[in-house]
Image (tube, helix red, strand yellow):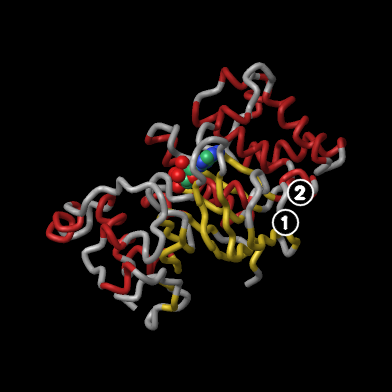
């Protein structure tokens, strides 16, 4: 299957003036197969949003290559061609943020098609109907202003706005966080349907393991800017190899054995913010760390038993 998104050795550093630099993404590589969903998981501050924003061409990267639908993404966000932006659309945590509250939503959809030139003007209405239907939105809503919509409706409308532009790749950053549980359930099913029925691929940033299990075919686990484990969702969630992945899953999955949960939960909290000069960034918190973990930075290696499963840990491989 062809990859529609390829990320190779990407580094992103923030250099706020007067403050220390943050290496938010370090040597990240991943590939998203057409018509599938790849999840980025990891605790807050691990670099998920930064990597997603670099993929969208919204922030510059220091180094590394990103290919979207086979085309190289320029390093400088100002040089990203409109045609490239049109094919990948973001959906951020706060769905309202991308919708001007005072605009009628029908006009917002039309404006998106006009700006991107995704379809002929004569097709506007048909295109809107296709996506309103697919997203379970009533056409009556088109005359409402964005601020008159519920959270779930706003989110679906933000999705509709992305899809009428002809986007085939969605970058979803914590898409369910702002929704209540019934709307979360509905949105998860919608996203699955967009993938299955419409072949829409997605890069999903989420700390919601339930959503990841439901939607994502593959998963990459990030810790302190690095991808420390990756593979198909089933393998990684059922047979996590990296001690950090186990910790992450134990802290959210009630199905984990109680004994393991108690043991892992007693690990020290992560208070260190800067990258270690050498070694694995997780080593100071790791129950399995050996001397070399504090010296060498492990790179991803294939797990012998799992097809495509890779882990950056010398102890477990
Ligand atoms: N605009 C920014 N300026 C400076 N530092 C930033 C900026 N955005 C993110 N960071 C830092 O980069 C790191 C990764 O952040 P982020 O990608 O938002 O993580 P996540 O999405 O996994 O929670 C954090 O240490 C964060 O403080
Ligand atoms: Mg984030």
Answer above or below: position of 18 versus 12. Answer: above
Does the residue at mark 2 contact the one at mark 1 (Cβ under 8 Å)? yes
Numbered tag placed on residue 50 in the rendering: none
Q: Nearer the viewer, residue 283 or 188?
A: 283
Which residue is under mark 2? Answer: 80
The answer to whether the beta carbon of the residue marked 1 is less than 8 Å from any atom of ligand 1 is: no
Q: Residue furthest front?
A: 18
Which residue is under mark 1? Answer: 73
Answer above or below: position of 50 versus 184. Answer: below
For label 1, count other residues whose C-alpha is less than 10 Å away and answer few (under 14), some (14-19) or many (20+): many
Which secondary structure, mark 2? loop
Classify residue 293 as left or right of residue 265: right
Q: Nearer the viewer, residue 243 or 150?
A: 243
Residue 189: tell me if it is visible: no
Which secondary structure, mark 1? loop
Asked which quadrant contains residue 172, the reply is top right
Q: Gap in Å between the C-alphas at discs 2 and 1?
A: 7 Å
Answer above or below: position of 263 versus 109. Answer: below
| Residue 8 percent across, percent down from the top left | 61, 65
| Residue 29 percent across, percent down from the top left | 55, 65
- The residue lying at 62 percent from left, 31 percent from top is 98
Q: Nearer the viewer, residue 116 or 215?
A: 116
Classify residue 130 as left or right of residue 229: right
Asked which quadrant contains residue 158, the reply is top right
Mark 2 or 1, nearer chain start:
1
| Residue 246 percent across, percent down from the top left | 28, 61
């Amino acid at each position: 299957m062809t990859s529609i998104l390829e990320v190779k050795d990407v580094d992103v550093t923030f250099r706020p003036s007067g403050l220390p630099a943050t290496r938010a993404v370090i040597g990240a590589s991943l590939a998203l197969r057409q018509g599938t969903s790849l999840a980025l998981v990891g605790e807050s501050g691990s670099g998920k949003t930064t990597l997603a924003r670099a993929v969208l061409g919204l922030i510059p990267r220091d180094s590394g290559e990103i290919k979207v639908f086979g085309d190289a993404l320029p390093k400088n966000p100002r040089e990203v061609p409109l045609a490239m932006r049109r094919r990948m659309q973001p959906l951020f945590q706060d769905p309202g943020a991308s919708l001007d509250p005072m605009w009628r939503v029908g006009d917002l959809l039309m404006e998106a098609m006009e700006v991107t030139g995704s379809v002929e003007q004569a097709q506007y209405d048909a295109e809107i109907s296709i996506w309103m239907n697919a997203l379970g939105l009533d056409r009556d809503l088109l005359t409402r202003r964005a601020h008159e919509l519920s959270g779930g409706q706003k989110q679906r409308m933000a999705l509709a706005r992305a899809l009428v532009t002809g986007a085939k790749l969605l970058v979803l950053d914590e898409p369910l966080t702002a929704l209540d549980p019934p709307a979360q359930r509905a949105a998860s099913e919608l996203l699955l349907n967009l993938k299955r029925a419409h072949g829409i691929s997605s890069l999903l940033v989420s700390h919601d393991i339930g959503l990841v299990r439901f939607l994502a075919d593959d998963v990459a686990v990030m810790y302190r800017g690095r991808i420390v484990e990756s593979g198909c969702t089933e393998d990684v969630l059922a047979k996590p190899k990296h001690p950090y992945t186990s910790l992450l899953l134990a802290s959210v999955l009630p199905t984990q054995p109680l004994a393991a949960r108690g043991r892992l939960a007693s690990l020290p909290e992560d208070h260190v913010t800067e990258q270690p000069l050498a070694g694995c960034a997780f080593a100071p918190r790791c129950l399995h760390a050996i001397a070399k973990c504090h010296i060498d930075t492990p790179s991803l290696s294939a797990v012998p038993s799992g097809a495509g499963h890779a882990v950056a840990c010398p102890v477990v491989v």
